[in-house]
Amino acid sequence: MSDALIAQLRQQIAQQGPIPLESVMGQAVQAYYAQGTAFGRDGDFITAPEISQTFGEILGLWAAVVWQGMGMPGEVILAEAGPGRGTLMADVLRAAAAVPPFAQAIRVHLVETSPSLRAAQKKALAPSGVAVCWHDRCDSLPDGPLILLGNEFIDALPIEQWERGPEGWHLRCVDWDDSAQGFCFVRGPSADQVGRDLARFGAPFDPASTKALPAGTIAELCPQGLAFAEQMGRRLVAQGGAALLIDYGPAESAPGDSLQALKGHKYFPPLEELGSVDLTAHVDFARLCQAARGVGAQARGPVTQGRFLSGLGIEARAKLLMRKATPAQALELNRGVHRLINSSEMGTLFKVIALTDPICPPPPGFEASVAP
Ligand code: SAH
């Protein structure tokens, strides 16, 4: 556990009482990524671009087709939210080089809060020779047509948990338990006490659904994720473009506690090692799409990662690479693609949505998905 973070949280709790989970998770995630040691086989978890170069290459070709559908603007902002080690963008740029007019139009912007990950991204992208601009937040991206990619970005944004009490919903908070010398969950103030109108989020928060749920039920909201979808939706409507978000979670909103901590590829109780484990929660795709549609954007999907990548030809791409691969590299390629698309691995749990301006043609991979 990060000692500085514990001291900071304990002091905050001593001064103002139990802290909402959203605040604790936000601070823990920032502290965790500031170390910059999370990714890969030796880290705590492994993400799709770190599993196979084909993932980023397919996304690069996806972006090129979307750019064509946008009318091939002479300049397009190619942004990535939460770029990790920069592997995805490096693979995207390599694939984009196969479409020279697109490669020339690209202006790369990365949204990243961690200084050590920014350094890793700079190193990964140096060989591409492409100029890169960094931002702390998506709302400081420059104006203009945009293609934004985000892989496992939303799952790192802090969530609120609400607990069904005898009368209604209560904010779940984190307290310090002196006898156990550790953090623990407590039931915090009611939605009324914190001035939140939860009913507007629909099930399970509307009065009829709430009534049907037993006390103790947990339901989650990701206010920063919803704000991101709304802000991105508004921007896409006004300035054109598309955002592709890939993450893990169910297709339909449902109550439940999905907060999880991963360290060294193993699950941990989420409050046990705050700041030194990866804390994430399921992404509520339906709610994100709803938020973008609410401001006039088009939201497509979710489609499963397996269907999306297979539909865009990831297996054919891997076969092409295998022609020049050693037997060991070919095995690695096969394993990687299998892991990305197979239902028993990442193929079904991971899902993809696309937010676009309303006149954008259906992006590749979403042709069959129903438009609102
Ligand atoms: N996309 C990468 C990394 C995913 S991990 C991959 O697939 O490998 C989450 C990433 O989001 C990290 O780069 C982390 O530093 C960044 N991040 C987390 N919270 C953020 C926030 N609030 N704003 C910007 N970046 C954030």
Image (spheres, grey):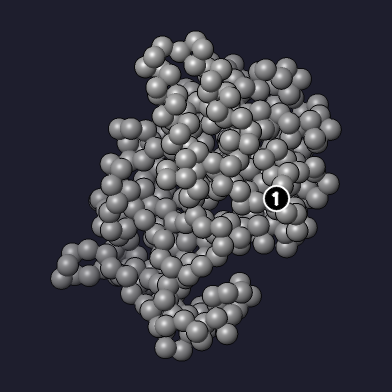
Rendered residue at 45%/63% (across/down): 22
Residue 194: percent from left, percent from top: 51, 78
Q: Residue at position x 73%, y 54% from top?
A: 370
Q: On the image, which quarter does residue 16 sit in? A: bottom left
Helix, strand or loop at mark 1: loop
**Which residue is drawn at the image coordinates 43% and 68% (left, top)?**
256
The residue singled out by tag 1 in the image is: 369
Report the amino acid beneath label 1.
Answer: Ser
Say how many tags the image has: 1
Q: Residue at x 57, y 23 (%)?
A: 317
Q: Residue 208 appears in which quarter of the rendering?
A: bottom right
**Closer to us: 225 or 97:** 97
Q: Quadrant of residue 288?
A: bottom right
Q: Position of residue 23 (x, y in %)?
A: 43, 61
Q: Residues within 10 Å of mark 1 (few under 14, many from 20)?
A: some
Viewer-closest of 136 and 198? 198
Left/right placement of residue 28 relative to residue 63 reads left
